[in-house]
Amino acid sequence: MSNIGAYFQAYKNAKATEFVIKNFRKHHPESPITVFSDAGDDFSNICKEYNCNYQHRFLNLGRQGSQNIKLQSSYPVDIRLAFNKEEMLVWMQRFYESCVYSVENGADYIVMLEDDVYVKGEITDLPEGGFSCGPDNPENLIKPELLNYLQRKYNVKCNVNYYACCGGAVFNAKIFTDNYLHILNFINNEFNILQKLDDKTGWLDFFIHILYFYIGCSYSVNSQFAETWWLPKWKIDWGDPQYSIIHQYKDLY
């Protein structure tokens, strides 16, 4: 069995959900998979077919929660939805349960699946430093005020100044479970402060990046990760066999 499991929070796109699970299972036939229905459809039949740990929850978090955050930045979309502290804690509890299930079933790493993540090969590039995903994107910078605050108060060493933990990111699940109580305390004590230092704090792809820095991990670029928009912009073909994790695959939307 490969040393990677999967976490997937789904909602109401059964066609895309089954496609994602089916393709991950194709290349990881014995890996643990946890699927949460985010107060959406009942995916129990799909999960039974592909041998997944299914959890149906009745609180809807949504893709990015319920707060409208208007950014004072050059980000191409200046209004996005973000989690508040309570929503972030609920999401972390679901991720923790998935990490525990993964570790208990022999996989120390976990990939974050979403409806637009296409796993088209075995995931073998596992981050020794703790977590990995895409490369540097100058539009995804972490504000220096937040980085400086973490370094001064917690002596946090951030090896990059950008965030990139979108769908398809790979995390060390065992490190997360071992540090879960520290993570909860950090969120309770620091979330609102961090939100004032960087208004992207409520975004999951941003905040989980910060959390892994906080628990002593370093970020690396995953050599198997690609996004569908890279071909026209950077002339990188995500169809190349070296790429096993494809993000922004929207064919089933």
Image (cartoon, rainbow, N blue to C red):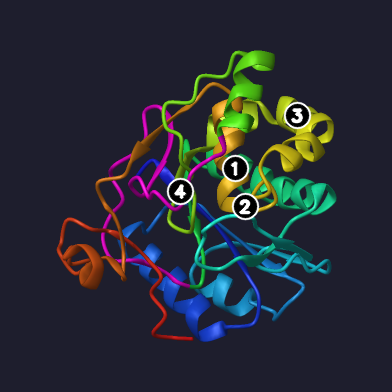
Q: Position of residue 246 (x, y in %)?
A: 33, 64
> Residue at the spot x=41%, y=72% of the render?
22
The reply to whether dot 4 and dot 1 touch (C-beta < 8 Å) is no
Judge whether 32 appears above or below 239 on screen. above
Q: Amino acid at mark 4?
A: Ala
Q: Position of residue 203 (x, y in %)?
A: 64, 54
Q: Is residue 237 left or right of residue 180?
A: left
The numbered dot on residue 204 is: 2
Residue 137 lies in the magenta-colored region: yes
> Element under label 4?
loop
- Distance in Å between CA atoms under marks 4 and 1: 9 Å
The reply to whether dot 2 and dot 1 touch (C-beta < 8 Å) is yes
- Distance in Å between CA atoms under marks 3 and 4: 21 Å
Judge whether 229 appears above or below 252 on screen. above
Q: Is residue 163 left or right of residue 239?
A: right
Q: Amino acid at mark 3?
A: Phe
**Mark 2 or mark 4, which is nearer the start of the sequence?**
4
- Distance in Å between CA atoms under marks 4 and 2: 10 Å
Mark 3 sits on what residue?
Answer: 186
* Most common SS among magenta residues: loop
**Mark 4 or mark 3, which is nearer the start of the sequence?**
4
Residue 207 lies in the magenta-colored region: no
The reply to whether dot 4 and dot 2 touch (C-beta < 8 Å) is no
> Residue at the spot x=56%, y=31% of the render?
144
Q: Amino acid at mark 1?
A: Ile
Mark 4 sits on what residue?
Answer: 164
Q: Magenta span covers which residues?
A: 116-143
**Front-lying residue, 194 or 28:** 194
